[in-house]
Amino acid sequence: MILEVRYTRSFILDLKSLETSVYQRMYKFIFAEFAHHWQMRSLPELRQIDHEGRFHRFTIDEYLVGIEVRGEIVKFLRVIPMPDV
């Protein structure tokens, strides 16, 4: 399966605002590992967040990453710190 990966402006801005060590970890996972080894079940702590199955979130370290999946298109939406519970 050929996967098309897209990034929203808000995702890129979120990524740029991360501290250097977190940015490097995210960058490596999202732009290298994810692109070459795409499988939904391989994403850490993946959760569906809508009824239609389009929107999901997963975690990397202490950050939530939001994605939209439409067929063979995966769009990265946001990366935010995990909220304190």
Image: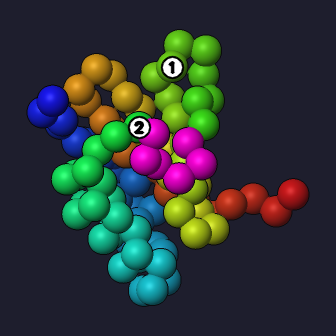
Snapshot quadrant of residue 75: top left
Q: Look at the picture and state if 67 lies above or below 48.
A: below
Residue neighbourhood size for the residue with mark 2, other residues' Cα within 10 Å, grouped as few (<14), some (14–19), many (≥20):
few
Residue at the location (25% across, 30% down)? 73
The stretch drawn in magenta includes residue 65: no
Q: Residue at x 18, y 35 (%)?
A: 3
Q: Where is residue 18 drawn, in percent x and y?
A: 48, 75
- Residue 85 shows in the view: yes
In terms of sequence position, does the residue under pointer 2 or pointer 1 come before the other? Answer: 2
The circle drawn on residue 53 is 1
Q: Quadrant of the C terminus?
A: bottom right
Q: Could you say whether the residue bearing mark 2 is in a helix, strand or loop?
A: helix
Q: Are marks 2 and 1 in contact (CB under 8 Å)?
A: no
Label 2, label 1: how far apart the Cα atoms are: 12 Å
Tell me if 79 is positioned left or right of 48 in this view: left
Magenta segment range? 41-46
